[in-house]
Amino acid sequence: MKSESATDLLSAGGWRLTDLTSRTVTAGSAEVPTVSLVGRLKPWLLDNTIEYKAGGAYNVSEGALKATTDAPALTTGAWQLNAKGDSLTVRQDKNVRRYSIAELTASTLRLNYSEGTSPVTTYTTVYSH
């Protein structure tokens, strides 16, 4: 049986946010805890579905809940994996974000995104089918 490629796994259907954490480390500081942020997210963010389409199209479909009644039902962009399949770049309008892929299976997508230099904050976002 041929194993599925990262592209196949990523584009196999809609992904929904199931967890979001942050961890901030300052150079020379003691170990810091990981903080769960998912409970702080607005409900209308938790029912969105993200789809990575074959060919590089990226869609975010609003669920039943919306921030405002005139919020678009669909937001689009583009995505690209690096050659090793361990880094994901997402472009939406003029925003570009690069994630490292910590886990990608048939049912789980775990992405890490870091910002800052000292301190460095790493956000881990988990999506499921």
Image (tube, rainbow, N blue to C red):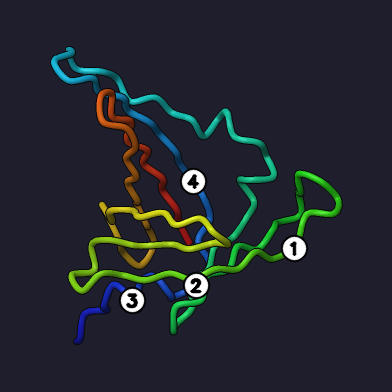
Residue at the top extreme of this rendering: 30
- At label 2, which amino acid type do we have? Gly
Judged by depth in the image, the label closer to the viewer, 3 or 4, is: 3
Report the Cα–Cα distance between label 1 and label 4: 20 Å
Q: Closer to the camera, 16 or 57?
A: 57
Residue neighbourhood size for the residue with mark 4, other residues' Cα within 10 Å, grouped as few (<14), some (14–19), many (≥20): some
- At label 4, which amino acid type do we have? Thr
Residue at the front extreme of this rendering: 94
Left or right side of 47 for 53 = left
Residue located beneath label 1 in the image: 73
Judged by depth in the image, the label closer to the viewer, 1 or 4, is: 1
Residue located beneath label 4 in the image: 18
Report the Cα–Cα distance between label 3 and label 4: 21 Å
Judged by depth in the image, the label closer to the viewer, 1 or 2, is: 1
| Marks 1 and 3, the one that precedes in the sequence | 3
Residue 107 % position (x, y): 39, 62
Disc on res. 13: 2
The residue lying at 60 percent from left, 62 percent from top is 60
- At label 1, which amino acid type do we have? Ala
Report the Cα–Cα distance between label 1 and label 2: 18 Å
Residue neighbourhood size for the residue with mark 1, other residues' Cα within 10 Å, grouped as few (<14), some (14–19), many (≥20): few
Residue located beneath label 3 in the image: 7
Residue 35 % position (x, y): 39, 24
